[in-house]
Image: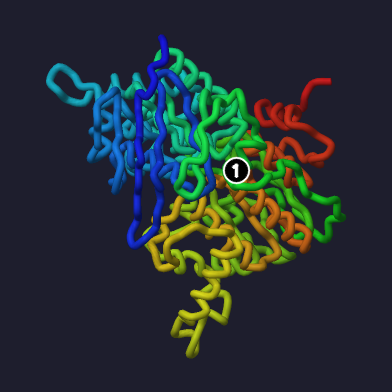
Amino acid sequence: MAAIEELISLNNIVKVYPPNVLALDDVSISFREGEIHALVGENGAGKSTLMKVLYGLVPFNQGNIFYRGRRVRFQEPGEAIAAGIGMVHQEILLIPEFTVWENIVLGSEPVDQWGRLDEERARQLVGEKIQEFQFHLNPSARVEDISVAARQKVEILKLLYRRVSVLILDEPTAVLTPQEIPLLFAELSRLRASGHTIIFISHRLEEVLALSDRITVLRKGKKVATVEAGETTRQELARLMVGRDVLFLSRRKPQTPGKVVFKTENLNFVNNQSRHQLHNIQLKVHAGEIVAVAGVEGNGQFELVNAIMGLNQPTSGKIFVDTTDITQTEILERRRLISFVPQDRGKMGASLSAMVMENAMMTHHRLNPRFILWKGLLLNFNYAQIFTDQIVDRFKVILSSKFSPFRSLSGGNQQKVILGRELLLDNPFLLLDQPTRGLDVGSIEYVHEQILRIRQEGKAILMISADLEEIFLLADRIVVLYRGELVADLPSDKTNVEEIGRYMLTGKAIPE
């Protein structure tokens, strides 16, 4: 069907967060029916805020919104959904105690002739959607028991189940594997062909260019430009986003690894359902070396991270850091040796209701004597502020105040605080689980520089990443987890994306 200009029009939108943070500065943008329109920009540029304004989640101070030619101001998301606008948020907004199918149908449940929930029909509908997208979800699993990537899939399926006509996606692929992303894109393209409008927020510029019809760039709360996707490049978009050229090349320099800093010996983990989720894991990481773990989500990465951090007790085997056997060690003692960036920053990496400063000094306040006064009974408040300012300055965190709640930061700025906190622990071993999730290209470039600097200083780094490009930019060696087993251990300069992808999907090498 022919595109209709200005299906949605946001005119001169202003949003000020008290006391004086100008999140949106006179932003005007329109979206056409039957197009995929991408929003890009640095962390804190206003992308998510603008979409929350449209969706009725955030009130705005000035401007007008028109939808299908009618002026609207949704007071809450239910009104937007009723009008045909749905949003998948960057942060998970599911009910942890509910199952997958319960979360998906919640609010749009099929009912029987007496108006009661038709559970059999609900399970059937959800099962059909899961099969359609090949998301490999268990409809009966409780959301609190599944991984972040699986929860993101539930969020996406929840709105696709409702078949909204305008779909807002805020970083929906951030935790999807390379194999899952094309499946999502194929469905989004079909939705566009049928007249749906899709607003797509992403930091992955390759995705933006591959999927979008038009792209709007925001910088520091202002609209910089709207361009046709076919008439721009990754480099030009990055320049518009950050105001400078961004390099997309590896800066990893050859260096000889040192002693073994981290290793596992015959590590096994069997879950409560007697499923062998880790099988005889033999893994080593040397000083001055980055080892990346690749694998399709659900093949043991989550269990490996939990075993290393002491959140799951291995069924058998041993874990060593710097010659110390930590297999039975308490978590705080492990933290004297391990810096850890978890994939789920809201659940495992931070306290969203606590202040930014409190999150910045977590673990440090237990291990660094400079945080403690008078026989360990008082916190050195002045040093805590100085330390937080160091993280904010070094990692370019955008915030209104270090005393603000952590949840007031954008997802990318939350990740910067956590990265800064962990990198400043100065431990011999770093465990990085999706370290650049939700970061923009400029921030990713900076974080990569910091990781490589720490490698150069002789630290050992084990990184789990769903981004194969990131893996090849940073890793000295790449190991692949397949069904809980290590099926490959290859130098990154002697393999390629196709070979690693083959191991990820089949557990086997590319046939000769």
Q: Whole-percent x and y of residue 508?
A: 73, 27
Circle 1 packing at 10 Å, graded few (<14), some (14-19), many (20+), is many
Quarter-wise, where is residue 78 in the image?
top left
Q: Whole-percent x and y of residue 151?
A: 44, 38
Which residue, given by chain and number where applicable, does mark 1 sit on?
301
| Residue farthest to the top, as pictured | 1
Quarter-wise, where is residue 465 in the image?
top right
Q: Residue at x 35, y 35 (%)?
A: 10
Q: Nearer the viewer, residue 394 or 358?
A: 394
Q: Is residue 100 left or right of residue 204?
A: left
Q: Residue at x 33, y 60 (%)?
A: 18
SS for callout 1? helix
Q: Nearer the viewer, residue 231 or 402?
A: 231
Task: Tell me how the rendering is colored.
Answer: rainbow
Q: Whole-percent x and y of residue 477?
A: 77, 44
Q: Whole-percent x and y of residue 117?
A: 21, 26
